[in-house]
Amino acid sequence: MSAEDNQSKSEKTDEIKCKGCGKVLSEKELQENTYVCPKCGFHAHQPVRDRIKSLTDRGTFTEMWGDLVSTDLIGFSDSIPYAERIEKYRQKTGENDAIVTGKASIHGNDVALGVMNFRFIGGSMGVVVGEKVLRLAEFAGENKMPMIILSQSGGARMQESVFALMQLARLSGAIKRFQDDGGLFISAIAHPCTGGVSASFAMQGDIIISEPGALIGFAGPRVIKDTIKQRLPKGFQKAEFLLDKGFVDKVVHRENLKWILGKLVSMFVSTPMKEVN
Amino acid sequence: MVHLEFEMPVVELESRLEDFRKQAISRSVDLSSSISAVRMEIEQKLDEIYSNLTPYQIVQVARHSSRPKTIDFVRFLTPDYITLHGDRRFGDDKAMWTSVGTMDGQTIFLIGQSRGRNAKENSNNNFGMASPEGYRKAMRVMELAEKYKAPVITMLDTPGAYPGIGAEERGQAEAIATNIRDMFGIKVPIVTIIIGEGGSGGALGIGVGDRVLMLRNSMYSVISPEGCASILFRDGTRFRETSSMLKLTATDLLELGLIDEIIDEPIGGAHRSPIKAMELVKKAIKKNLLELSNISDSITEHRYQKYKNLPPKL
């Protein structure tokens, strides 16, 4: 696999404070524990290449469309020009945009896999994320594979304006065709997932699974608080809250995520319904 | 009518016109030449102002309270309309309008965010900010239209989907996600018109049309200029800048290839001549429905290809 992969293997000594309990942990300690705090169980961000490794059978992931790169479509510039921002994040993360897509096997079954990369401009969705999800759904349909996407995103990328908004429609069209054609789409969600990603593919799964404690919603809690000028209920918009309200099928600890995805895939691909004798 | 700051030169002329009129009546003098001179001046001034609106001025016009709203379009296009209510699951969201009616003999289904024209209507309609039950009602009505093979017209006019506790509890993201996806399966033509403010995913939740048209002074954006300013600059008052940055005007979006057509507005904007504006919209709808009725492939295939082929080509 790629250079990023080696990088994630290298020892890191950076200390990280757990956002759940405040305990100071080394990156290495976290990495060994799939970025779940050993003390409080908080599910921190797991780097995208680590994530792919922990979800797939060893050595089976083949990346696709990894060379797609966004450009500045509308001359956008805030503190820095958007083109520079993209470049900066490409350098910083070693990735070209906010999702990695490809095919892999899980428990021996082939799947089309997408894993979002939260470290790339907050996992925001612009034309590259939209295009890769669209292609992934078409690929999965053509090859009769289940599709799994792990979402983790702040929403549409505003630096790409209506181009970003249109991705919600583009990729949803592809998912619609895939699902209508009998394709299984499992959406897995990690903390946090809001805006245009939750209002498109993250919530379009035939089965939706979330990690514990993940914030999932359309509007972010701050926007809601500012609008209604009230305190938000405890646990509001957390995965467990959505489970209770009927919007996710399961809340699954990271260490069991691969197992349940593999199990589901195997049940769906094994046999179309047989005649019951 | 609310007057926008940049319309003030016209407002002065209009009050002069009113004075002439009153004088002509009270003193029974013939001021017709002065009156027509002022009229012409007003027209010129409006044309000058409205040909040079800045993006933020367009945002202001797009949100103008006197601009024709979904309900005005419904009354104009389908005078015999019958409203439809409720998502059959939870309730009836007044922020989302749905009705059936005939437009020159053709049955059409009209769906739109229902922004109010005044404070009372806005409090009733929640400023056109829909909740999940609104999106689900819209989908229910689109499926009804499909069943009876009648076209769907959707009208976008909302600051966004409602960011409230109940809306989130009832699955705002899921409701919008489902609509955006399932609109790709609706087997009748869908024409989407942005009549005022096309506010992000909340607008798009009923906005996956075979044709996407924008009124000349409407806007369509991934985020409000105010929201964008507060995120980018931590300063919500820099919305004039972000209005320009976001390329949210009809002219920009047509040039970028993201919408299909601009519907012109009468001189001085739709809020000054709503009937004329709605006539132009009606003409555009009829033209587009006729074109869509000639599509030989399946309409859903056509719709998918349209979106798939949106720029940029990667």
Image: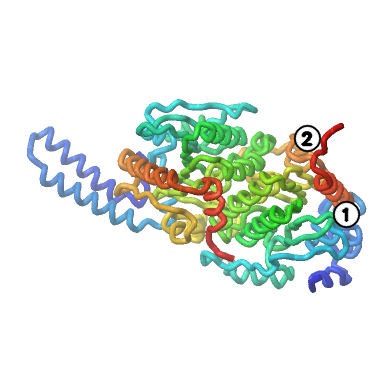
Residue B276 quadrant:
top left
Q: Mark 1, chain letter?
A: A
Q: From the viewer's perspective, is B90 left or right of B285?
A: right
The residue tagged 1 is A107
Q: Nearer the viewer, mark 1 or mark 2?
A: 1
Q: Secondary structure at mark 1?
A: loop
Q: From the viewer's perspective, is B285 left or right of B24?
A: right
Depth check: give the residue in front, A64 or B55.
A64
Depth check: give the residue in front, B140 or A248.
B140
Q: Position of residue B24 (x, y in %)?
A: 12, 37
What is the distance, in whole Å, between disc 1 and disc 2 at their CAs? 30 Å
Are the residues flagged by discs 1 and 2 in contact, CB closer than 8 Å? no
Identify the disc placed on residue A244: 2
**If the image is split into quadrants, where does the N terminus of chain A sit?**
bottom right
B139 shown above or below B11: above
Q: Position of residue B124 (x, y in %)?
A: 51, 30
